[in-house]
Image (spheres, rainbow, N blue to C red):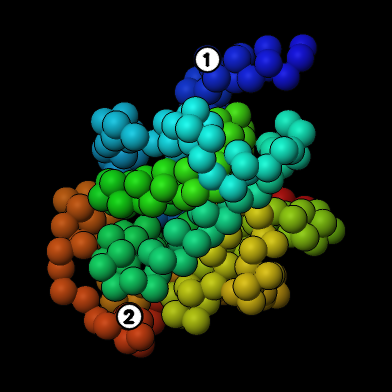
């Protein structure tokens, strides 16, 4: 199969492949969590998380411009850094893939650093535990904010449509993987962690302690956190006892879909003071080694 045929196939099947990557990972990793005793924590959170998933699918389907549309436009106009370079198609795909992951990293940082964005993104961090259902715990407004930013950067960098599609398929599976409540064998954790974001790395990002919440921003590749000095690590024992979520809202409200939808409009502490001293029961991470 030549690159043109491959690109056409990926293009026509991009949406089914993305859904297959996401829901396939959700089913497989969710089954592993259920199979290990203690892997399912507070299942009454699931209706709210699944409700947000359904809303987000509707919102994403209604957004008229996405990363792929932006990539098509940039390629047709010859705009963007990569479109101005005479790169071979493998180099263009690799560069586009890396730059698209950098955009995700930068957007994620902005969701934490800009107070107006944090109001929305804190819905994701309000989950007091972590499993595959946390993957989809996002306020619909977050996608309305991030999609135009991502699209603009896709045009700026001139990321090819094929690179965008391949990244989104990969990112769909990685998003589930990084949120799973499973601990990898130590050797595999070290090897994968050199390149990819692992569940241990992302678990630190969901810590109730702000210095840790404001670290490990990578969605797919770990090298951006290493490069920009935002990587934090903990021992497996520390991870098992780590408090997750936001201390400001450790109660039953975090399991309510309507409360989560209204959360961005509620008054909250300043960013530097958003974590209180509430005692939170740690959630155990499952060892699959």
Is residue 193 among what the camera can see? yes
Give how far across and how far down residue 77 sits, in percent: 48, 32
In the image, 278 versus 190, the foreground residue is: 190
Give how far across and how far down residue 93 sits, in percent: 68, 37
Give how far across and how far down residue 188 sits, in percent: 80, 54
Element type at mark 1? helix
Find disc 1 in the rendering and name its residue: 12
In the shown orientation, is residue 283 left or right of residue 285? left
In the shown orientation, is residue 28 left or right of residue 56? right
Q: Please tell me which residue is depicted at 54% across the width and 44% down the height of the picture.
A: 80
Find disc 2 in the rendering and name its residue: 271
Crowd band around label 2 with a 10 angstrom C-alpha radius: few (<14), some (14–19), many (20+): some
Element type at mark 2? helix
Mark nearer the viewer, 2 or 1: 1
Q: Earlier in the sequence, mark 2 or mark 1?
A: 1
> The N terminus is located in which quarter?
top right
In the shown orientation, is residue 270 left or right of residue 229? left
Q: Is residue 123 above or below residue 204?
A: above
Q: Please tell me which residue is depicted at 53% across the width and 23% down the height of the picture.
A: 14
In the shown orientation, is residue 95 left or right of residue 104? right
Q: Is residue 63 above or below residue 270?
A: above
Dot label at residue 127: none
């Amino acid at each position: 199969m030549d690159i043109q045929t491959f690109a056409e196939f990926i293009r026509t099947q991009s949406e089914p492949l993305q859904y297959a990557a996401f829901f396939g990972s959700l089913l497989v990793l969710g089954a592993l969590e259920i199979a290990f005793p203690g892997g399912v924590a507070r299942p009454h959170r699931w209706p709210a998380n699944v409700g947000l998933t359904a809303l987000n699918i509707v919102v994403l389907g209604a957004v008229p411009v996405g990363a792929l549309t932006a990539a098509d436009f940039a390629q047709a106009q010859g705009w963007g850094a990569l479109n101005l370079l005479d790169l071979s198609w493998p180099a263009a795909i690799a560069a586009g893939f890396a730059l698209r992951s950098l955009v995700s990293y930068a957007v994620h940082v902005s969701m934490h650093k800009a107070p107006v964005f944090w109001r929305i993104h804190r819905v994701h961090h309000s989950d007091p535990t972590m499993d595959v259902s946390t993957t989809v715990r996002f306020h619909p407004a977050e996608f309305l904010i991030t999609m135009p930013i991502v699209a603009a950067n896709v045009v700026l960098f001139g990321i090819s449509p094929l690179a965008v599609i391949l990244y989104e398929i990969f990112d769909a599976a990685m998003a589930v993987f990084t949120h799973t409540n499973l601990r990898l064998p130590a050797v595999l954790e070290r090897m994968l962690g050199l390149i990819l974001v692992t569940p241990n790395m992302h678990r630190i990002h969901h810590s109730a302690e702000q210095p840790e919440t404001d670290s490990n921003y990578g969605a797919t590749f770990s090298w951006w956190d290493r490069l920009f000095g935002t990587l934090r690590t903990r021992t497996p024992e520390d991870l098992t006892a780590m408090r997750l979520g936001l201390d400001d809202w450790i109660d039953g409200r975090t399991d309510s879909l309507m409360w989560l939808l209204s959360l961005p409009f509620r008054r909250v502490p300043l960013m530097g003071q958003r974590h209180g001293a509430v005692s939170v029961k740690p959630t155990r991470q499952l060892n699959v080694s």
